[in-house]
Image (tube, coloured by chain):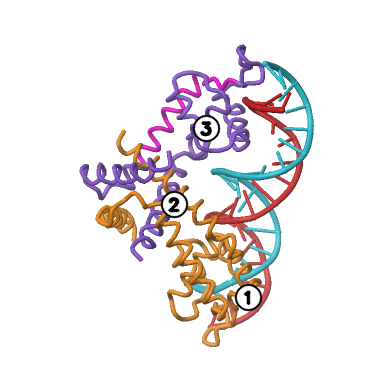
Chain colours: A purple, B orange, C cyan, D red
DNA sequence: TATTGTTATACTCTATAACTATA
DNA sequence: TATAGTTATAGAGTATAACAATA
């Protein structure tokens, strides 16, 4: 019974987060998946291969393809052939992509702020620890 | 920074929950949305109108239509004209629908059990309280 | 006029399977 | 034969807009 409520709450709260994030990303011309990929690329601090980024995002490479298509078309990312292995594509952040990644980061921070506004700092930390435990058991 | 990690964790954990639930629902011939609607209907303990159920699920009525279509085709739910207001459709659970709702409930309980397995009872309660606070601020 | 529900359309997120190019 | 990525296809979940029937 308690687990069921927990599952339902988790679902509702995460959907709410997605909505808040989504609205803030509209002005950037990004959807959450694109923003997440862009951010991961910025976090890496260096070009990543498709397989590597997909792994980072925990999706299959095929699912990453349209995401990167959109980012490339928007001039935020460049696909380059990996000189070390010509089967591989290196994803390179453009200067514009780097700027947009920062704005996406702000959007996510704001969405998080809004969602977790009722929680104190200590409570947020607690929540982060509990979710971290749950997530870690699969990694 | 902490909020960002929290947001990301929430996203990852809820996606994991969805996957676990999804797999357990396959044998029932349901997807999570259908199962959720069926469960809400069973929880209500009486026929509900479309608008009312949509509200309960926090989606727009239009999004509920294909869900109910599927449930009706599977013989789990019947659409009846509301005698009190002929614009309205009453959603009535069939006996088979009631049984399936129970099985869906078990599936969800198991998916929750699996996901939150690493947490103690006290930790689950804590997590439920924190998520409840977050959710309540919008209700 | 306002409400209930549906038809039509579209976008996001993700998956599997089959294929191409390269190793 | 194995790996990296793409083409093709599909299904879940959700939305907005326009419309018909009813109130």
Residue assigned mark 2: A15
Instruction: List x then y, in percent, for residue B135.
Output: 33, 56
Instruction: Name the residue at 49% across, 40% down.
Output: A32
| Position of the C terminus of chain B by quadrant | bottom left
Residue A52 forms part of the magenta stretch: no
Label 3 marks a residue whose chain is: A
Q: Is residue A81 left or right of residue A31?
A: right
Residue assigned mark 1: B75
Instruction: List x then y, in percent, for residue A64.
Output: 58, 34
Residue A96 forms part of the magenta stretch: yes
Residue assigned mark 3: A55
Q: Are marks 1 and 3 in contact (CB under 8 Å)?
A: no
Q: Are marks 1 and 2 in contact (CB under 8 Å)?
A: no
Disc 3 packing (10 Å; few <14; some 14–19; many ≥20): few
Disc 1 packing (10 Å; few <14; some 14–19; many ≥20): some
Instruction: List x then y, in percent, for residue B72.
Output: 62, 73
Name the main secondary structure of what is drawn in magenta: helix
């Amino acid at each position: 019974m308690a687990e069921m409520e927990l599952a339902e709450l988790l679902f509702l709260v995460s959907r709410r987060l997605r909505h808040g994030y989504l609205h803030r990303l509209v002005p950037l011309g990004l959807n959450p998946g694109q923003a997440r990929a862009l951010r991961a690329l910025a976090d890496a601090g260096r070009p990543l291969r498709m397989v590597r980024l997909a792994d980072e995002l925990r999706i299959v490479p095929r699912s990453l393809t349209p995401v990167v298509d959109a980012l490339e078309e928007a001039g935020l990312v460049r696909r380059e052939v990996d000189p070390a292995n010509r089967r591989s594509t290196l994803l390179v952040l453009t200067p514009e992509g780097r700027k947009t990644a920062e704005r996406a980061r702000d959007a996510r921070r704001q969405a998080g702020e809004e969602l977790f506004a009722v929680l104190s700092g200590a409570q947020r930390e607690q929540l982060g620890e509990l979710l971290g435990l749950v997530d870690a058991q699969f990694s």
